[in-house]
Amino acid sequence: VGVSRGRADGGGGRLRWGGGRAGLGGARAQEGAFLAAIGQSVTAQDRDGRLLFANQAAASILGAASPAELLTWTPEDFGSRFTVTDEHGRPIALDDYPGTRLFHGLDPEPLLVRSVEHATGRILWSQVSATAVHDEDGEVVMTVTVSDDVTAVKGAEAAQRFLASASKLLGSSLDVETTLSRAAATAVPQLADWCRVDLLDEHERLVPAALAHPEDAPDEHVRLARGTAQR
């Protein structure tokens, strides 16, 4: 992918497509080496959503063996590997992403994305922003997306909110069953995909006291939560 810093007719800066093939020498090779080496996840895609470039950080975060493997993924592949929502748990469509919105002539704000990997249950939070790349005629030919990994920050925020809410709930009622159910629900989905509370009975055996999961939780999560609670 070769891009160069150009100037729009009005004098403002914009990214301009430099033409040619990826990997050519000179400034384009330096730009490619820089994008490949930086710690942020960087991808470039065309109007159809096809990946044209991905650096090692993007491959590592998404669980691909290499950038080359990631370039073979289709939008459907991403959908089969991850459940993607916004910070409020609402599904995010392809048209909601900043890169896609740029192709529609919009000026999108950065998007906070929560991704859950189906195979492992791993939760990833990303702050996604994009820049349009124009050809000589000013048409958008591709978009470059930068994703900042904010998982640690969002995890700490969710844990603090959960502890504060759970502490308040535990002291708000003498009804143990109701209190524990509310406390479990507080953890979902901000802190976990499901939450189970077990208590010791008079024989010192763990028995389920509360269970919470989203109504649209994947079947495997529901089975795991209920199965574990029954053990």
Image (cartoon, grey):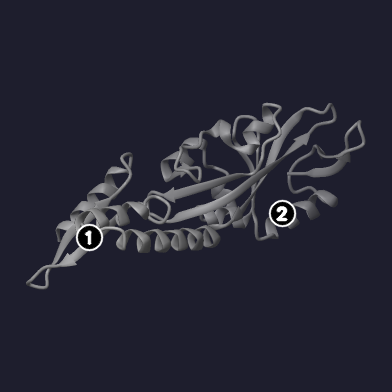
* Residue 40 in picture, x, y percent from top left: 65, 56
Q: Residue at x 71, y 27 (%)?
A: 105
Left or right of 209 in this view: 111: right
Residue type, mark 1 in image: Leu
Question: What residue is pinned by disc 2?
Answer: 35
Please tell me whether residue 138 is drawn above or below residue 69 in the rendered image.
above
Q: Is residue 81 visible?
A: yes
Q: Which residue is mark 1?
A: 174
The residue drawn where x is 87% and y is 40% is 6
For the view shown, which residue lies furthest in the left direction?
A: 203
The tag on residue 98 is none
Q: Is residue 4 left or right of residue 209?
A: right
Q: Position of residue 3 (x, y in %)?
A: 79, 43
In the picture as drawn, the residue positioned furthest to the bottom comes out as 204
Quarter of the image with the N terminus is: top right
x 36%, y 53%: residue: 186
Is residue 211 positioned above or below 202 on the image? above
Mark 1, residues whose alpha carbon is within 10 Å: few (<14), some, or many (≥20)? Answer: few
SS at badge 1: loop
Where residue 218 appears, x then y in whole percent? 32, 43
Rendered image quadrant of residue 164: bottom left
Please tell me which of labels 2 and 1 falls first in the chain: 2
- For the C terminus, the quadrant is bottom left
**At numbered mark 2, what does the secondary structure look like: helix, strand or loop?**
helix
